[in-house]
């Protein structure tokens, strides 16, 4: 019997596992890096053990430290969560060698599926359909496009699409470097890239008595940078024959490796409806809640039951009911190449409506750092039909209050309401085709709605400055005083549109906007306006110079002006600034002051939140200054280099004068 579980992970998944452990009467142990000392998963655990350092390689990827932590805390079992060491056979073996229960599949199953290349060979022998691998060393133009993938892991790390043969060597190098950093293994393989394919997977749960459940399908096609963004169960639009084929192939894959516990068999389904085996994830998936909702199960509880040697509750899984959709809320800016965002998360509130579930590793007041994945939370909706679930999820996200770093919330809402998604026309190229439209400003009525929100911000600020809002006790102070027009200026984030709001303070002390809206109430935190015959409520929250305005139809963030100037406005032309906080991992070959560069050429690679980001040359010219070096940690806006349209000999003179 398991009494105490250490979760060898962090954030949302650690909190998720702790929740089930509490319900089962199991004590919990967290591990944490220095960067996570105040994190939610640490606060929720019964006991916590520090892993000195901040980088994953020094902390959450140190299996020896995690095992030592489990022993020190008196744990008798280890749950790996997902990511980090969850699919590391050596770690699983070390856990068992230490006399601890491993809440995961057999070590042999992990080993067989750990290498995607070996897994494909095994699946071919089990008659599971798959794509033929391509040798990158002998690939020709006829093999394009190719998909490069890390052999030792998933989650989009080390994955690249290659459409031009000339770029293959550089992409192999980049993919291998990213894979080595994420998994400690730089092996990369190539396979044909299927255009407009769907990512469909089958959840597996198996016990030690030979029972294997295939828990329906999930569609995970909406991805950015090969990482899933929106997932749903069951996968829409599959005929019964294809569903049976996917279920049978998934069960065959599990049986071929003697699987036990929770796992997922992933497939690529072509536009013609032909499935291909991609990989088997020998762990719990991020998107497991949609399966839990549809089948009424707790997969973590089943993992613990199987780890204790118990059987699954029945020979067949329960019947599915309804439809579930999950959206991953990321601290990132989709309109700026998905740049991860950091800083204080001041508020995170999602409406607690029937059918809505929130899995998160953050609460208001936490800080989003640079070291880990930028996912803040997962919001899941379950309803009788797909239409109802999608509508419920979009509405919950729209009404959520999220103050702090820029997030992908608006993208999620627009994606869920996009005609292709509503109709179930899904494939992995969805964001490639629609991102510009999904992130574009200037939708019908958007400017008017933002101006009205800025008006509410100005009136709330005015009410606060006047002492907390109008009321009978304040009438005498304003009765005979004429009001001068006042203005407040706001810049909408993140696109920078500026709004100037003019208002007067009336005889009763109520600020009245100059654009004619009727003010029904104005307090520092709440404003009610009537415009065009409609009454609208605004919740206004101010943090320093940032003002957040939440309505039932959307949320708006403004910076009150005057503001600090953008770092780009204080630097010379051609300056390359760090677009985010991170660590410089490498430079372009031969990059030194005086080198000639071409417009769009990748010069510097930054690692932030477990992903690599390229800094490109803004124009063709000469590198006149270089401040970046591998291993250097930089803040957002830091000057990395300068490219100028200057003669190549100029930097040499500059270098001599600065010695």
Image (tube, rainbow, N blue to C red):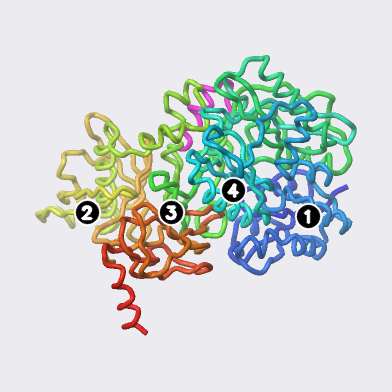
Q: Residues within 10 Å of mark 2 (few under 14, many from 20)?
A: many
Which of discs 4 and 3 lies nearer the camera? The answer is 4
Task: Quadrant for residue 653, please give it.
Answer: bottom left
The span from disc 1 to disc 3 (Cα, nearest Å) is 37 Å
The span from disc 2 to disc 1 (Cα, nearest Å) is 56 Å
Looking at marks 4 and 3 on the same chain, the residue that comes earlier in the sequence is marked by 4
Task: Quadrant for residue 94, please give it.
Answer: bottom right
Give the labeled residue for mark 2: 489
Which of discs 4 and 1 lies nearer the camera? The answer is 4
Residue 356 visible within the image: no
Q: Please state which of residues 644 and 454 is positioned toward the viewer in this rendering.
A: 644
Residue 560 visible within the image: yes
Q: Which mark is residue 404?
A: 3
Q: Is residue 414 left or right of residue 535?
A: right
Looking at marks 1 and 3 on the same chain, the residue that comes earlier in the sequence is marked by 1
Number of numbered callouts drawn: 4
Q: Residues within 10 Å of mark 4 (few under 14, many from 20)?
A: many
């Amino acid at each position: 019997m398991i009494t105490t579980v250490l979760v060898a992970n962090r954030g949302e998944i650690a909190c998720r596992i702790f929740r089930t452990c509490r319900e089962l009467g199991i004590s919990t142990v967290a591990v944490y890096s220095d960067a996570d000392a105040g994190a939610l998963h640490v606060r929720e655990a019964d006991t916590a053990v520090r892993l000195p350092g901040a980088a994953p390689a020094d902390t959450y990827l140190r299996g020896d430290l995690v095992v030592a932590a489990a022993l020190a805390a008196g744990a008798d079992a280890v749950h790996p969560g997902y990511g980090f060491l969850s699919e590391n056979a050596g770690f699983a073996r070390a856990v068992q060698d230490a006399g601890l229960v491993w809440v995961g599949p057999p070590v042999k199953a992990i080993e067989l599926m750990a290498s995607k290349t070996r897994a494909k060979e095994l699946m071919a022998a089990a008659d599971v359909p798959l794509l033929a691998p391509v040798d990158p060393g002998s690939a020709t133009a006829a093999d394009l496009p190719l998909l490069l993938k890390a052999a030792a892991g998933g989650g989009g790390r080390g994955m690249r699409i290659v459409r031009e043969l000339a770029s293959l060597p550089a992409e192999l190098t980049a993919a291998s470097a990213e894979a080595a950093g994420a998994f400690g293994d730089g092996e990369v393989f190539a396979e044909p890239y299927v255009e407009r394919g769907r990512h469909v997977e089958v959840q597996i749960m198996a016990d030690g008595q030979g029972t294997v459940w295939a828990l329906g399908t999930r569609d995970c096609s909406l991805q950015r940078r090969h990482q899933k963004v929106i997932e749903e169960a069951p996968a829409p639009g599959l005929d019964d024959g294809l569903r049976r084929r996917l279920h049978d192939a998934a069960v065959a894959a599990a049986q071929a490796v003697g699987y036990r516990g929770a796992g997922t068999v992933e497939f690529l389904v072509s536009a013609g409806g032909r499935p291909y085996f991609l990989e088997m994830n020998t762990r719990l998936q991020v998107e497991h809640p949609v399966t839990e909702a549809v089948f009424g199960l707790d997969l973590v509880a089943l993992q613990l039951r199987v780890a204790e040697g118990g059987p699954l509750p029945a020979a067949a899984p329960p019947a599915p009911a309804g439809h579930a959709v999950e959206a991953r809320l990321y601290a990132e800016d989709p309109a700026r190449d998905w740049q991860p965002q950091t800083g204080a998360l001041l508020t995170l509130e999602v409406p607690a409506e029937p059918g809505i579930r929130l899995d998160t590793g953050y609460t208001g007041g936490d800080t989003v750092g640079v070291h880990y994945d930028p996912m803040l939370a997962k919001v899941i909706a379950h309803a009788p039909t797909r239409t109802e679930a999608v509508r419920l999820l979009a509405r919950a996200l729209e009404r959520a209050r999220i103050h702090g770093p820029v997030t992908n919330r608006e993208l999620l809402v627009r994606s869920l309401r996009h005609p292709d998604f509503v109709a179930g026309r899904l494939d992995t190229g969805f964001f490639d085709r629609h991102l510009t439209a999904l992130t574009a400003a200037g939708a019908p009525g958007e400017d008017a709605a933002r101006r009205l929100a800025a008006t509410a911000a100005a009136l709330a600020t005015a009410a606060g400055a006047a002492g907390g809002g109008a009321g009978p006790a304040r009438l005498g102070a304003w009765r005979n005083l004429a009001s001068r027009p006042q203005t407040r200026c706001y810049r909408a984030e993140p696109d920078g549109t500026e709004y100037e709001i003019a208002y007067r303070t009336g005889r009763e002390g109520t600020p009245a906007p100059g654009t004619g809206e009727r003010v029904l109430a104005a307090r520092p935190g709440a404003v009610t306006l009537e415009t065009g015959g409609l009454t609208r409520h605004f919740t206004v929250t101010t943090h320093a110079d940032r003002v957040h305005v939440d309505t039932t139809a959307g949320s708006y963030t403004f910076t009150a002006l005057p503001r600090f100037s953008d770092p780009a406005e204080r630097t010379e032309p051609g300056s390359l600034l760090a677009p985010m906080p991170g660590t410089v991992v490498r430079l372009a070959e031969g990059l030194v002051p005086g080198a000639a560069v071409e417009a769009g050429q990748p010069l510097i690679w930054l690692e932030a939140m477990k992903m690599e980001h390229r800094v490109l040359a803004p124009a063709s010219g000469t590198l006149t200054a270089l401040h970046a070096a591998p291993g250097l940690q930089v803040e957002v806006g830091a000057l990395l280099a300068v490219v100028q349209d200057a003669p190549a000999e100029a930097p040499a003179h500059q270098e001599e004068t600065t010695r």
